[in-house]
Image (cartoon, rainbow, N blue to C red):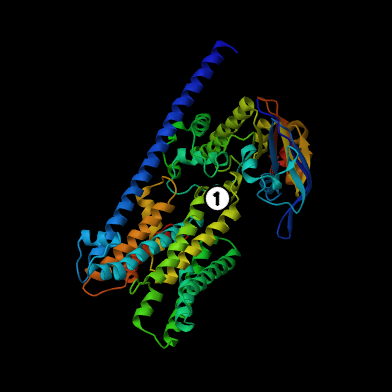
Amino acid sequence: MSAADVRDATRASSAIASAAHEVARARRARGRRRRTVIGVLVAAVVVVFVVSLMVGRTFYGPAEVLGVLLGHDVPGAGFTVGRLRLPRAVLAVAAGLCFGLGGVTFQTMLRNPLASPDIIGISSGASAAAAFAIITLSLDDAQVSAFAIVAGLAVAVLVYLLSKKGGVAGTRLVLIGIGIAAMLDSLTAYVLSGAAQWDLQEATRWLTGSLNGTSWPQVVPVLIALAVLTPVLLSQSRDLSVTQLGDDTASALGVRVDRTRLIVIVAAVGLISFATAACGPIAFVAFLSGPIAARIVGPNGSLLVPSALVGALLVLVADVVGQYALGTRFPVGVVTGVLGAPYLIYLIVRTNRAGGSL
Amino acid sequence: MTIDHTLEIEHLTLAYGDRVVVDDLDLVVPPGRMTAIVGANACGKSTLLRSMSRLLKPVSGRVVLDGSEVHRLPARQLARTLGLLPQSPVAPEGITVADLVGRGRHPHQGILSRWTTADDVAVAAALDATDTTVLADRAVDELSGGQRQRVWIAMALAQQTDLLLLDEPTTFLDVSHQIEVLDLLTDLNRSRGTTVVMVLHDLNLAARYADHLVAVAGGRVHAVGTPHEVLTEDCVRAVFGLDSRVITDPTTGSPMMLPLGRHHRAAAGA
């Protein structure tokens, strides 16, 4: 090796060392941004959660709410906060987490913000099945959840099979999903109209989602689903982010694409279906959470956790607003629907302008 | 230098549905060399490359890496030895160059193991080798075609595999960027002993840069050997159905193909 070669080699290795520092710095900055966003979102969820326990026909202070949460016997607040507001707020958080996680999983996997489970019919399927199970068959909560998840998976398989043949899977899948969602929604309406105990409350729950009259037996299955399926999804999060590079690249990087996709679909559909069985398909939460999380986090790693938290925050805030801020009490799905519809229009307009590819 | 890996294809038949694309093909990839696969459109060359990195399961026959069939190896283990850059990889919206190149480290990381300094160094070395260090913080979607292709190659380099397969790495690039990419692959082959297998469209560039040429026609290997052995007028006619003159490249001494269209045959005296 000549002196010049040695010099070149030294220069190259010192250039790489300084570049490695740069790479590490940028990576740490990405991590910091993500952790900060997650921290702020957690704090926001906690604050809105406590506020939602405080406000209502009767106002209770933070001390009373905390007392109830700690299991103390607080006169008055014990019933209103503990039995009426707490299950509702817990379901708001749990369902929001489910919708946020399930939504962003589908959007990431299919590389398309429109391909969220509430747009492509999975929520509608779970909702129609839940409505049928409760209203027509009078089943209990566990059976309703089972019904919902089977229907959710069935719709996922159906949409996949129908959109599999022929070219652009993304656009086809979304359009087929929208069609199936419309059919399933009309099925829900049919179930509602055919039932003896048809009322407005039930109709809004199964068509747009509502937290009215939430009680603990409804909440428990959702919490169990979260406890079981969240770790499953998170364990796939790195593989999932690699599949974003396209199937061939992901496979070349050692990801078993089909296996990852199967696990992720079952887990995401499970979360969506359990939440839907409890409170209906709260409109657009699954659809909105991912893109909102992406905006705040930026391209700084997995969106699963931030999106789950955004979902929880959306449902909590929308429920508080729907109940107390608008004069009349609106179910939560009406409020999230008002938020989601303009974004849907925006996406479709943008898609048209970009030349038709979704 | 790296250990020489053997990559052999035995009686390989590949099909999409009922359509047979590669038919009973045998091929040995020479270790530590640059191999270029050439052939007409839809002759099965990309399909062959995909199957070599187990993206496509053979109907019959097998692809054998160091004595084991690639379709039976654990996915991550294979991905630590054999890398593939597909024809049209997708970059997620807004992803930065450093982040994308970092994805190349995926097969080296377990589910629980964290990112290490070795990963940072591998990414930095890949950026340095492809001359993309200055782009590290830029978003991939705002780069030019040539820069983007270098970044994708950097991702494949960060994977640190001893074998690297590339499906048309020079498509959509202008001539200077094509040369840049091929020079980079040559550097890699010479300095690290990486075995490079690439599908190329440009016969003259293939003849210039590859040690070993494989001409594929109708899902079979038509000719294989050094550029001098493979790139002949007869071979071009058989593989591409094109009349041509093959002369010696005055700069490198490698064979050079001049196509003869209907309007030029007379002038060439053919």
- The reply to whether residue A83 is visible in this rendering is yes
Residue B140 position in % (x across, y down):
45, 42
Quadrant for residue A98, please give it.
Answer: bottom left
- Report the quarter where the N terminus of chain A lies: top right
Residue A279 position in % (x across, y down):
39, 71
Q: Residue at (57%, 46%) from the top-left corner? A: A249
Closer to us: A316 or A16: A316
Toward the front, the furthest residue is A73
Q: Which residue is mark 1?
A: A246
Quadrant for residue A283, please give it.
Answer: bottom left
Q: Mark 1 belongs to which amino acid? A: Gly
| Mark 1: few/some/many CA within 10 Å (<14, 14-19, 20+) | some
Residue B256 position in % (x across, y down):
69, 33
> How many tags in the picture?
1
In this rendering, is residue A96 above or below B270?
below
Q: Residue at (52%, 47%) from the top-left corner? A: A242
**Mark 1 residue element:** loop
Residue B68 position in % (x across, y down):
74, 41
- The reply to whether residue B167 is visible in this rendering is no
Closer to us: A268 or B10: A268
Q: Chain of mark 1?
A: A
